[in-house]
Image (spheres, rainbow, N blue to C red):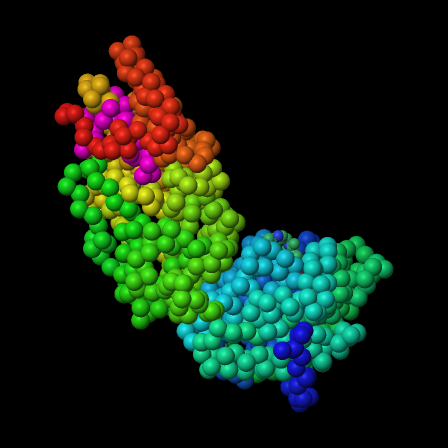
């Protein structure tokens, strides 16, 4: 094997072919510059004057010529290889390039008819870019053909891989910035080569763009030398082919010829790999593209080198309005592309630019995979009642919620086996999260060697396990964006690793809701388990319920958060989430044996409502002295245990138990589509009685959601307050004052009528907490009265 890159001899091709490729590339470059700079005079029919230039110059030039080169050559390959292809721009700040390509192939005008393919349309194309009322500067959802905005760098390759899962004929060409390649998620993404099945999946074609620079610094991979870079890529399962512009960079012909030949070769190689089928030593081909940053732009500005340096990253000529030299340089830069040869008198692209481009849905901006909702087939869901547990009496028996969900997911896999449109993603935790029943229907995807001691690995497995939350998230997003379904199960504490990726996906969904032609896609579903309250063998590092706090910052149109209190509720909620569209659903549920509270029918009703009074636990007869509210499986158990203590010791106290499954019900109806009206909220919580709320996560969130409610001054929330360690389950709740004894104390402290009457009970609660503390230290386990507790209240 070659020690460094594979070199392919430049193609021997006709002058016409080269002229066509170069014309397309120059046209795209011209349009990219035009978008950054011009308000008017789009074809430079007049001498350029300051008033033709935008008042604020916003955009990124440096990456555009590289993206355009890739798009030009991908277009040729789509036609000549009859490819079904999409293109992802990792450096999504190169928005002008992708918009330019869309306009040239016609998809922009089809999507936005106001922006015609003529002079006036070109003026509008230029004006709209990074302009109020226009379009964003990045490859945002507004751009036809985009599934990847690339605003936050790092996710391009993971998205591309997710896109080709179960799309055997799709090629996802993915440009990766050499700066982007320094990010953790992108660095991890190279490992994806071991998860793409040559038979069942399509192919990703990574194009690592070594333009040498980021915003203000050299890029690492451009400086480590060919041997180290090639070794890194090969070690990750890729065979790197090099395409480099000539030494002086002033003759693109060599780049065109090398790119042409190399693209042909790598596509042939992909074909060979797919024909050869599964082998554990597959090295997928990829391209290392070495061209100068800001290629074809100004060579020098104000005496400083710009082309081929970091200075070309954004707007190379910044002072066009006031500096006649800058203005002249801009004009000669734009004229260097010979716009008169590229666009006709009417401003439409000339035949040489577009006559050979792909047509119809083969155009990069029209490929249906990039508007995944168009291809979305409903997930066939089993009846979740087939997996529910029987509950004869509430709070007597326990079951493992996620284990039941695992059985339901097994059936989801079976029912959708032919459609091949569902996958489960997780960082090595599917079994640990007790979802192991899925392995009865499918295995874990794995293309490498396997040993006799390995279990449930198979090249065509549909469970994706890799110890990178970034990859799980990125793959799933790519899978969803191209019209499929999935679920990400993750330890609650470590899902924070993808906080930022969630942000970006939520922003994408919010934006697409405002873009009529984007067809809704399946929701991004998180199952957060192994949660804060039950980290018995892991401790403090694993205790962090804050992802939900992060999630609720996002647009109410997009986010939903569920705390099913038991197995039957988890099944009802999961079933609903799996069938939903355009949302991010977060489900938090423990994997440990959890008390069964509701029958399947009660669970359905409760989850439909999202919040409700638990009649079986309440004795308020419509006039409570106190409301005990709860959200989350462990807080629900502590609340019910507190309720039974109150019923035993203070039988006259009228207690109402309210359980919250759908956290967004707490918000106002004008703030969230699931929000309760004030009237509903007041009837549940009253406006004047104390509310003791036991919440799964950080208590402040409940205040944040309910701060406008009439009863808010009476609301007292208990939750996780960052007290934790490796200890018993009950010790965890005691340390955070959310235990049953403390909840009883809270009630006594807040119900004015109790006062001295309950002083003795309060003291007993203090004593029980003290006894608990000494007991766990002596025996290393919870007291029997806690461990063996079940709901058995005194009669009303
Ligand atoms: C995660 C992240 N960190 C920082 C930035 C800010 N940023 C925007 S572009 C850029 C440099 C990108 O360099 P590269 O990937 O090489 O792209 P190109 O050279 O093609 O412009 C940076 C740091 C970002 N967009 N995303
Ligand atoms: Mg770069």
Residue sitting at 50 percent across and 50 percent down?
498
- Quarter of the image containing the C terminus? top left
- Outermost residue toward the top in this view: 756
Q: At which x and y percent is residue 744?
A: 30, 22
Q: Is residue 383 left or right of residue 312?
A: left
Which of 601 and 33 lies nearest the eye of the viewer?
Answer: 601
543 w.r.t. 723: above or below: below
Q: Is residue 639 magenta?
A: yes
Residue sitting at 44 percent across and 36 percent down?
726
Q: Is residue 141 left or right of residue 754?
A: right
Q: Is residue 253 visible?
A: yes
Number of marks in picture? 0
104 w.r.t. 298: above or below: below
Magenta residues, start to end: 616-645
| Quadrant housing residue 682 | top left
Q: At which x and y percent is residue 417?
A: 31, 68
Q: Is residue 146 magenta?
A: no
Which of 568 and 760 lies nearest the eye of the viewer?
Answer: 760
Residue sitting at 38 percent across and 46 percent down?
529
Q: At which x and y percent is residue 609?
A: 26, 42
């Amino acid at each position: 094997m070659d020690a460094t890159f594979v070199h392919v001899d430049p193609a021997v091709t006709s002058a016409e072919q080269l002229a066509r490729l170069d014309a397309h590339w120059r046209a795209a470059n011209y349009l990219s510059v035009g978008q950054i700079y011009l308000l008017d005079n789009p074809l430079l029919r007049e001498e350029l004057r300051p008033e033709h230039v935008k008042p604020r110059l916003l955009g990124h030039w440096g990456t555009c010529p590289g993206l355009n080169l890739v798009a030009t050559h991908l277009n040729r390959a789509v036609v000549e290889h009859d490819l079904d292809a999409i293109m992802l721009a990792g450096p999504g700040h190169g928005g002008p390039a992708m918009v330019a390509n869309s306009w040239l192939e016609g998809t922009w005008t089809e999507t936005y008819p106001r922006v015609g393919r003529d002079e006036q349309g070109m003026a509008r194309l230029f004006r709209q870019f990074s302009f109020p009322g226009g379009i964003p500067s990045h490859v945002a959802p507004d751009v036809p053909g985009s599934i990847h905005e690339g605003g936050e760098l790092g996710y391009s390759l993971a998205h591309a891989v997710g896109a080709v899962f179960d799309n055997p004929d799709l090629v996802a060409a993915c440009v990766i910035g050499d700066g982007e390649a320094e990010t953790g998620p992108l660095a991890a993404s190279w490992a994806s080569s071991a998860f793409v099945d040559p038979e069942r999946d399509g192919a990703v074609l990574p194009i690592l763009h070594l333009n040498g620079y980021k915003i203000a610094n050299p890029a690492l991979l451009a400086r480590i030398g060919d041997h180290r870079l090639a070794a890194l890529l090969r070690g990750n399962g890729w065979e790197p082919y090099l395409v480099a512009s000539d030494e002086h960079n002033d003759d693109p012909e060599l780049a065109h010829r090398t790119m042409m030949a190399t693209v042909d070769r790598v596509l042939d190689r992909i074909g060979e790999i797919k024909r050869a089928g599964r082998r554990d030593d597959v090295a997928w081909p990829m391209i290392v593209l070495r061209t100068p940053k800001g290629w074809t732009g100004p060579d020098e500005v104000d005496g400083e080198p710009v082309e081929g340096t970091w200075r070309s990253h954004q707007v190379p000529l910044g002072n066009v309005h006031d500096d006649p030299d800058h203005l002249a340089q801009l004009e000669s830069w734009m004229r260097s592309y010979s716009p008169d040869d590229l666009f006709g008198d009417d401003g439409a692209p000339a035949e040489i630019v577009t006559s050979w481009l792909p047509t119809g849905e083969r155009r990069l901006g029209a490929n249906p995979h990039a508007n995944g909702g168009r291809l979305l087939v409903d997930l066939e869901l089993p009846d979740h009642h087939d997996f529910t547990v029987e509950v004869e009496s509430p709070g007597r028996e326990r079951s493992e919620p996620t284990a039941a969900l695992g059985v339901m997911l097994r059936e989801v896999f079976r029912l959708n086996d032919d459609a091949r449109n569902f996958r489960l993603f997780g960082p090595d935790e599917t079994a640990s999260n007790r979802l192991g029943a899925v392995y009865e229907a499918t295995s874990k995807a794995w293309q490498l060697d396997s040993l006799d001691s390995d279990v449930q690995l198979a090249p065509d497995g549909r469970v994706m396990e890799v110890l990178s939350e970034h990859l799980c998230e990125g793959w799933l997003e790519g899978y969803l964006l191209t019209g499929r379904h999935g679920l990400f199960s993750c330890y609650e504490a470590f899902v924070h690793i993808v906080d930022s990726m969630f942000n970006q996906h939520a922003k994408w969904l919010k934006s697409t809701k405002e873009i009529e032609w984007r067809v809704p896609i399946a929701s991004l579903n998180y199952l957060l388990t192994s949660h804060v309250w039950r980290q018995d063998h892991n401790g403090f590092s694993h205790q962090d319920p804050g992802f939900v706090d992060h999630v609720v910052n996002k647009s109410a149109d997009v986010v939903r958060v569920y705390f099913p209190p038991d197995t039957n509720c988890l099944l009802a909620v999961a079933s609903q989430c799996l069938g939903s569209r355009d949302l991010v659903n977060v489900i938090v549920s423990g994997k440990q044996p959890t008390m069964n509270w509701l029958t399947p029918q009660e669970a359905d009703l409760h989850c439909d409502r999202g919040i409700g009074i638990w009649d079986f636990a309440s004795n308020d007869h419509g006039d409570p002295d106190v409301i005990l509210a709860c959200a989350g499986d462990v807080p629900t158990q502590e609340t019910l245990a507190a309720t039974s203590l109150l019923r035993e010791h203070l039988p006259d106290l009228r207690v109402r138990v309210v359980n919250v499954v759908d956290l967004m019900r707490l918000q106002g109806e004008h703030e969230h589509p699931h929000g309760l009206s004030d009237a509903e909220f007041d009837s549940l919580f009253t406006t004047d009685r104390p509310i003791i709320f036991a919440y799964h996560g950080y208590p402040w969130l409940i205040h944040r959601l309910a701060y406008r409610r009439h009863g808010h001054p009476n609301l007292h929330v208990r939750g996780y307050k960052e007290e934790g360690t490796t200890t018993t389950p009950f010790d965890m709740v005691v340390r955070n004052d959310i235990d049953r004894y403390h909840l009883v104390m809270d009630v006594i402290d807040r119900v004015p009528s109790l006062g001295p009457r309950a002083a003795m009970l309060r003291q007993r609660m203090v004593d029980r907490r003290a006894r608990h503390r000494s007991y766990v230290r002596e025996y290393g386990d919870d007291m029997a009265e806690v461990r063996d507790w079940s709901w058995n209240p005194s009669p009303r």
